[in-house]
Image (spheres, rainbow, N blue to C red):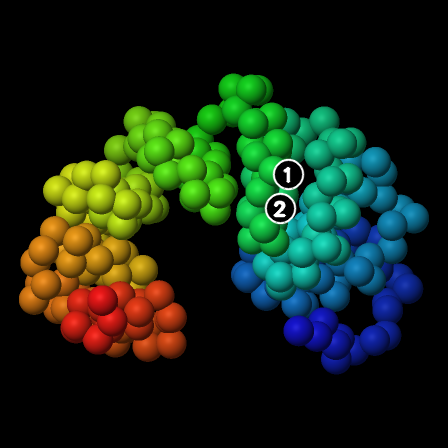
Amino acid sequence: MTFYENENDTIDDNSRPDEKFQDAVQLYQKKDWKKALDELLSTDTSGLNYDEKMELAYYLGLCYTKLEHYEEALSFLEQVVTSSSDILRVYQCRMTLAYIYVITKRVRMAEYELKRLQSSGLESPLLYNTLAYAACLQKQYKSAVELYEKALEIDSDNATAMNSMGFILADTGMDVMRALRLCRRAVDYRPQSAAYLDSLGWAYYKSGEVLEARTWLRRALDLAPNEEEIKKHFKIASGGDR
């Protein structure tokens, strides 16, 4: 992925140093990550105070994360975590660091960041969902289920926790009937999610309801025809690979 090339490389010398930064924040809020990054990188930092520099690092880290330039993101997010006095911003950056570490398979580092948050009392469904996902990557399925339970204790309608826990309970055979209930609820919240439809179809398959499984897996495949796991599940439910 290449960085956005600014169509106008001319800098207005009469503009205040923070104008480009404010433009970048607006672009970020509009989800125009590439343009936001370009504006941030061209911001004149000589006129920024300490807090403004921390805010700049914060948005640079978020932009690089959105653009999947994870190594660049880490350096800026770590600046905020180690130097910012804004507790909520540090929380968000630790969560983003944990996300990056999970995505890049640095599970132990993800757990470190998440447990720091947990010990500080800043708990949330997102924190427990991410911890649970890290546990799944290490095949610690019972621990993952317990963590998803904690997410649901905080937010009983959290569809991510419902779907993910349902899939684990079905796939491992721990509790297929509960898996079906959870996956149905998740699909009720997000009926157009291929991942949720796949989980529900797989739960039906694991419960022995093969025809029902094919129906839901077919819907999932129609929405995401290139997803390998969905293709695999549909093939198995169709009798092609047992």
Q: Which residue is mark 1?
A: 109
Tell me if residue 4 comes above or below residue 168 in the rendering: below
Amino acid type, residue under disc 2 in the picture? Arg
- Horizontal and vertical percent position of residue 239: 17, 72
Looking at the image, residue 198 sits to the left or right of residue 64; the answer is left
Residue 213 visible in this rendered orientation of the protein? yes
| Label 1 Cα crowd, 10 Å radius (few <14 / some 14-19 / many 20+) | some
Find residue 86 and report its image quarter: top right
Tell me if residue 64 comes above or below residue 146 in the rendering: below
Residue depicted at 87% across the width and 50% down the height: 45
- Horizontal and vertical percent position of residue 177: 13, 42
Q: CA–CA distance between discs 1 and 2?
A: 6 Å
Find residue 214 and report its image quarter: bottom left
Dot 1: what SS?
Answer: helix
Q: How many marks?
A: 2
Q: Which residue is mark 2?
A: 106
Q: Which mark is residue 47?
A: none
Tell me if residue 2 comes above or below residue 66 in the rendering: below
- Horizontal and vertical percent position of residue 200: 20, 55
User: Toward the viewer: 38 or 188?
Assistant: 188
Task: Check the picture and name the quadrant holding the N terminus.
Answer: bottom right
Residue depicted at 56% across the width and 53% down the height: 103
Dot 2: what SS?
Answer: loop
